[in-house]
Image (cartoon, helix red, strand yellow):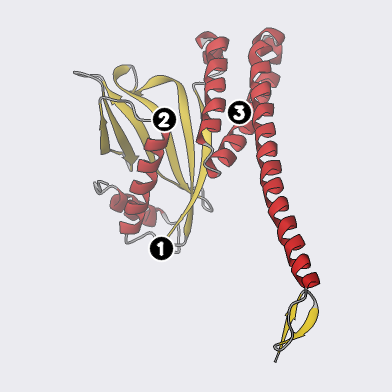
Amino acid sequence: MVWKAMGHGVTKHSKPTMKDGLQFHDLSQQNSEVVPNMIEECQDHTREREQNILLQIRNAVCWPEKFDSKHIGELKDLIRQLFETATREMTALATEKKYSQVEEIVQAIIKLASQWGEEFLASLDLDSFIREVITIEVKGIEYTINVGEYFKARPFYSRDNRLVIFYFFLVSESISKNKIMSYYLECSNIIQRFFVLGLSVSGSHLRVCSFDRCCPSYWVVREAVLQDMKVRINASLHVKRETTSQQDERELYEDLREGIIV
């Protein structure tokens, strides 16, 4: 019986030499140096990307002054490109669980919107931005969740400030692009401020869970959405359908509309 070590044939009766020991030591030392260096380089690259998008956002403050009404289309394209770049970066950071760095970008975007002003945003019909795009697989089907945050809380029902929303989570099937349901962080102002996670599906508006009078962080809401979504889809008897007919869609929506609370 022969073992292979360091590229040499070593019999079971042979003894390791000092040279072999030094070779093992050198290799171990090299590995211990390479891995931290790789991690550090990766972290530096991530930080560089984040700083780059933050700089782009800050430089966009003067855009409204540089474009007149004749070039509004060009301005819209620039803003779309900027926000799409920010979304990709925030999505990557969220995947890496670098939540504090995501929030840096979020705050920079919100500050930018504030500096642009409500009148300018209204002229572009711009009231929100996409924080991240989440991809999740449930029962063999891939779903895409486009998560957005409003620059300013907006009424859930038109011109009725008794119920306003802050975040939206638009759930759709990744392949068919069919919209399945939408979640919202809502705040009721009827008697006193009260925060809930709401769900809209097939014309119905449900309450999933409540957060009491304290506004939860985005990450708390995000986790609640993912948990509830998985429960609802797993409970659906029609989620494994092989067609996308309107009848199948209605059956799925009816099933998802059941008030599952997590």
> What amino acid does circle 2 point to?
Tyr
Which structural element holds mark 3? helix
- On the image, the x and y values in percent for residue 214 come to 29, 25
The CA span between labels 3 and 1 is 35 Å
The CA span between labels 2 and 3 is 16 Å
Residue at which label 3 appears: 83
| Quadrant of image for the N terminus | bottom right
- On the image, the x and y values in percent for residue 208 come to 27, 40
Give the residue drawn at x 25%, y 48%.
Answer: 260
* The quarter of the displayed image where residue 44 is located: top right
Which of 13 and 141 lies nearest the eye of the viewer?
13
Query: As drawn, is 117 to the left or to the right of 254?
Result: right
Instruction: Work out whether mark 2 precedes mark 3 in sequence or the reverse, and give the earlier one.
Output: 3
* The quarter of the displayed image where residue 164 is located: top left
> What amino acid does circle 1 point to?
Lys
Which structural element holds mark 1? loop
Residue at which label 1 appears: 240
Which of 148 and 177 lies nearest the eye of the viewer?
148
Q: Looking at the picture, does residue 78 appear above or below residue 44?
A: above
Query: As drawn, is 200 to the left or to the right of 66?
Result: left
Query: As drawn, is 251 to the left or to the right of 106?
Result: left
Which structural element holds mark 2? strand
Which of 242 and 217 lies nearest the eye of the viewer?
217
Residue at which label 2 appears: 167
Is there CB contact under 8 Å for labels 2 and 3?
no
Query: As drawn, is 164 to the left or to the right of 24?
Result: left
> What amino acid does circle 3 point to?
Phe
